[in-house]
């Protein structure tokens, strides 16, 4: 029996599909999101690892896309708080990560996104001066300024 790279690739895919607890689409979306914010696949793995350790959750019970989105939210939260002294998670504009695998998104009520926009404008924060992650997050929550 001849062993070719095609055969190895096929069995490699079979192996990873059976041992990794995430769907391939979830992994691809998590990596795509990471690349959009200037990170990579290693960062995704570290994010998931840190989440499972801090929340004491088994890796197979973890939503990899939600981990990425939530980490971006926390980094944007910290940056905005450092620049404006406004912690939108605990103040008047609560935004949370709605984990739903490939359909993960941010959830907010009322005009939370407008409150964040107004705080940034009030503090003379220029959108282009924010980190790539915070810009991406603001676009996701429809903050336009």
Image: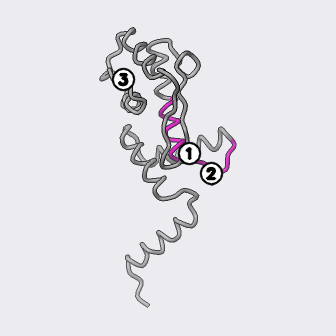
For disc 2, the marked residue is 59
The quarter of the displayed image where residue 25 is located: bottom left
Q: In this view, does 36 lie above or below 121?
A: below
Q: How is the image coloured?
A: one colour
For disc 3, the marked residue is 130
Q: Marks 2 and 3: in contact by CB < 8 Å?
A: no
Q: Position of residue 76 (x, y in %)?
A: 46, 26
Q: Which of 121 and 55 is in front in this view?
A: 121
What residue appears at the point 41 percent right and 33 percent down from the top-left corner? 140
At label 1, counting other C-alpha atoms closer than 10 Å, the crowd grade (few under 14, some 14-19, many 20 or more) is many
Q: Is residue 45 above or below residue 97?
A: below
Left or right: residue 45 compared with residue 3:
right
- Say what secondary structure mark 1 lies in: helix
Q: Where is residue 143 in the image (x, y as percent from the top left)?
A: 38, 24
Q: Magenta stretch: dominant SS? A: helix
- Say what secondary structure mark 2 lies in: helix
Precedes in sequence: disc 3 or disc 2: 2
Mark 3 → mark 1, Cα distance in angstroms: 25 Å
Q: Nearer the viewer, residue 93 or 41?
A: 93
For disc 1, the marked residue is 48
Precedes in sequence: disc 1 or disc 2: 1
Q: Position of residue 110 (x, y in %)?
A: 50, 22
Residue 76 is one of the magenta-drawn residues: no
Precedes in sequence: disc 3 or disc 1: 1
Quarter of the image where the N terminus is located: bottom left
Q: Marks 2 and 1: in contact by CB < 8 Å?
A: yes
Q: Position of residue 35 (x, y in %)?
A: 37, 43
Q: Where residue 10 is drawn, which disc sits there?
A: none
Task: Give the magenta-colored segment's residue range.
Answer: 56-74
Left or right: residue 21 compared with residue 102:
right
């Amino acid at each position: 029996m001849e062993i070719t790279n095609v055969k190895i690739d096929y069995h490699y895919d079979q192996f990873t599909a059976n041992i990794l607890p995430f769907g391939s689409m979830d992994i691809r979306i998590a990596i795509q999101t990471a690349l959009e914010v200037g990170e990579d696949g290693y960062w995704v793995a570290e994010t998931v690892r840190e989440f499972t350790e801090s929340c004491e959750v088994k890796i197979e019970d973890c939503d990899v896309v939600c981990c990425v989105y939530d980490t971006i939210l926390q980094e944007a939260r910290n940056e905005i708080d450092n620049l404006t002294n406004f912690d939108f998670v605990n103040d008047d504009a609560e935004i949370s990560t709605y984990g739903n695998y490939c359909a993960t998104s941010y959830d907010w009520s009322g005009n939370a996104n407008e409150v964040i926009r107004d705080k940034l404008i009030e503090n003379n924060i220029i959108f282009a001066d924010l980190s790539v992650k915070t810009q991406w997050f603001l676009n996701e929550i429809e903050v336009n300024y």
